[in-house]
Amino acid sequence: MTMLHLVNKSPFDGSSLNTATSIMKPDDALLLIEDGVYGAIKNNTSAAKLEGKNVSVLGPDLAARGLSEDKLVDGVKIVDYAGFVDMVESNDKVQSWL
Amino acid sequence: MKFTIQVNEGPYQHQASDSAYHFTKAALEKGHKIYRVFFYHDGVNNGTRLTTPPQDDRNIVNRWSELGKEYDLDMVLCVAAAQRRGIVDDGEAQRNGKDATNIAPGFRISGLGQLIEGGVQSDRLIVFGD
Amino acid sequence: MPEESKKFMYINRKAPYGTIYAWESLEVVLIGAAFEQDVSLAFMDDGVYQLTKGQDTTGIGMKNFSPTYSALGDYEVTKIYVDKESLEERGLSLDDLQHLVWEDEDEDWAEKDSIRLVSRTEMADILAGQDILFNF
């Protein structure tokens, strides 16, 4: 039983990323959407929270914010909306850390 | 797979309704079923036909209406949230003595039980909000 | 019980009054109680502020909905998980929260505590055991 965690806030806005990563189980997946994508930028002071976790970012949200793959923490995957749908399907439930 | 989508924010102010729309569209295009789209909190403001966004911007309300029509979606505005925020259909206008309606095509107003039932009947609940 | 009984959890992470989320999510819990699912509530992050005792809204002209939490037991909502870490981070303890109870009809209506203080690790296990997670 795995969970897809959605985070839509910058790590500097509230507790969403912090709490999500503290609740995540090893087999869970984290998808950063909307302002959440800022959390995946390499060398940001919250980046360590992503270590050892299965992290993806929503490509259209990344591009909208002028960010590209080379700016991301190593190992972070980029998915489109279809990939987002696949992640919802392949995990047993979804938790939105609003 | 059957999904219920919950939208907690109104159009334009927050990206939540855009994200929900793109997700819903992608899910439908992949052949999934959308059991219901439930609009709650300020999300009910996605269901007013009186919005007039600038011509060079997306029309969030029309976009939902069109997607709803194309796929015969059940798009529900929570009645309690809608009453607070002045979203009115014929039934609500009659019950509460309002002199106008503003609900957009393809939306309907119903109770919170519709959200719970969406959770019971669907394989996944996906919430978009602030 | 209905054929499809699911484990429903309502997750509360926002403070009351500053925004309407806490109040409108409580409305969902009350309506949802009629559906006879296995219901529980989680309070984490700023959501723990929802349960503080002594709330008095007369000065701001808003409805004080905090007494509603003490009625949850009557709606057979008896599992209220409070994240200990969130409480401590905010300088609060269990004593600062309302004392919420429910009556167990299987034990001659014995009064039992609804609030269960759990660690972050326990909260992770509790979330993992749910079927549907409602967020507001």
Image (cartoon, coloured by chain):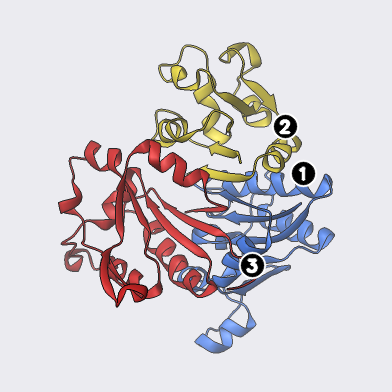
Chain colours: A yellow, B blue, C red
Q: Identify residue type, mark 3.
A: Val
Q: Position of residue C14 (x, y in %)?
A: 36, 49
Secondary structure under tag 3 reads: strand
Tag 2's secondary structure? loop
Q: Nearer the viewer, residue A26 or C29?
A: A26
Looking at numbered disc 1 in the image, what kind of residue is underneath it? Ala
- Position of residue A3 measured from the top left corner of the image (x, y, whole percent): 58, 40
Place residue C84 in its image quadrant.
top left
In front of the other: A61 or C95? C95
- Residue bearing the label numbered 3: B76
Category of crowding for the residue at label 3, using alpha-carbon neighbours closer than 10 angstroms: few (below 14), some (14–19), many (at least 20): many
Q: CA distance from mark 1 to mark 2?
A: 9 Å
What's the CA distance linking mark 1 and mark 3?
A: 20 Å
Q: Earlier in the sequence, mark 1 or mark 3?
A: 1
Given the image, what chain letter belongs to the residue carrying mark 3? B
Residue toward you, A6 or C32 = C32
Residue under label 2: A80
In contact (CB < 8 Å): disc 1 and disc 2: yes
Q: Residue at x 21, y 60 (%)?
A: C98
Give the Cα separation between the discs numbered 2 and 3.
27 Å
Q: Amino acid at mark 2?
A: Asp
